Image (cartoon, rainbow, N blue to C red):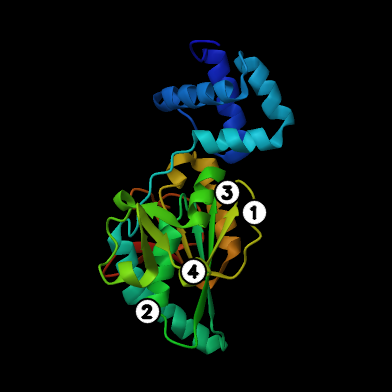
Amino acid sequence: MADFLSDADFEQYRKLIYDESGITFSATNRAILESRLKERLREKQIQHLSEYYSLLLKDKEELKLMLDSVTTNLTRFFRNQPHFDALINYIIPEVIKIKKLKGETKIRVWSAGCSTGEEPYTLAMIFKDKLPAPFTVEILASDISLKSLMVGKAGFYPDNRMVGIPEAYLPRFFDRTNNGYQVKDELMKMVRFDYHNLKNDSGARGIDVLFCRNVLIYFDEAAQKAVIDRFWDAMAPKSYLFIGHSESLFGMKTNFEFLKTDWACLYQKNT
């Protein structure tokens, strides 16, 4: 096996990853790409990067696994609390008003780049707690990482992953086990986990609230714009978009309006 990723190999793999997912690898995170590729070569018992590249071109399942391996999945329950404060105090009341005007009761939420499921389950807890009858919520949770999706679908989290959950929520929404916590069925039924590459149209429509946090940072400007345009198509009129606190649509030609609440800043599709 080669000891390093040559410049030519780096360019070849970087282009393939970008073309297939929109994720950009720069020189600064080249070492991450190299270590993840070495893992895949070991797993497949392949000696040379050129041989593995040929495999990726003809084996779509292996391509998915490779993209899975090169993505970083950092998450936790109630990550960036001000976003959830804005959801509770501003967004949910506003969405309810809009739904009442339309004579609708179902709220559609999408957690894009959901990783191992902490974000969609956080959303499920909040909606279960705060949503009055007869309103219901349907949460789509998507990611490019199959491994992460399997964790989310299983709904089991070890003790060290339970930080940040309000004390009252823990017994209400989780069952204690010997070595961690299991999400209760009522919450699991609210979330549908699905593989999705943000480079493609998800087919989702009528989304009222969309969370896509700390995902755009992996894309270049062109890929970011394409993702944001697809989000616009997926979202309902008068809907809300949350992105990461270090991310911004500033300078991007988009129809989303910047919205500053008392709790956090976000974006609105205001049509």
Please tell me whether residue 32 is drawn above or below residue 216 in the rendered image: above
Q: Which residue is mark 2?
A: 130
Whether residues under marks 2 and 1 lie with C-beta atoms below 8 angstroms apart, the answer is: no
260 relative to 7 in the view: left or right? left
**Sequence order check: which comes first, mark 2 or mark 1?**
2
Q: Nearer the viewer, mark 3 or mark 4?
A: 4
Q: Amino acid at mark 4?
A: Asp
Label ID, residue 258: none
Please tell me whether residue 50 is drawn above or below residue 145 in the rendered image: above
**Cα distance between the residues tagged 4 and 1:** 30 Å
**Sequence order check: which comes first, mark 2 or mark 3?**
2
Q: Which residue is mark 1?
A: 201
Q: Nearer the viewer, mark 4 or mark 2?
A: 4
Q: Amino acid at mark 1?
A: Asp
Q: Which residue is mark 3?
A: 198
Secondary structure beneath dot 4 equals: helix
Residue at horizontal 60 percent and vertical 17 percent from the top: 49
Q: Amino acid at mark 2?
A: Lys
**Cα distance between the residues tagged 1 and 3:** 7 Å
Q: Which residue is mark 4?
A: 185
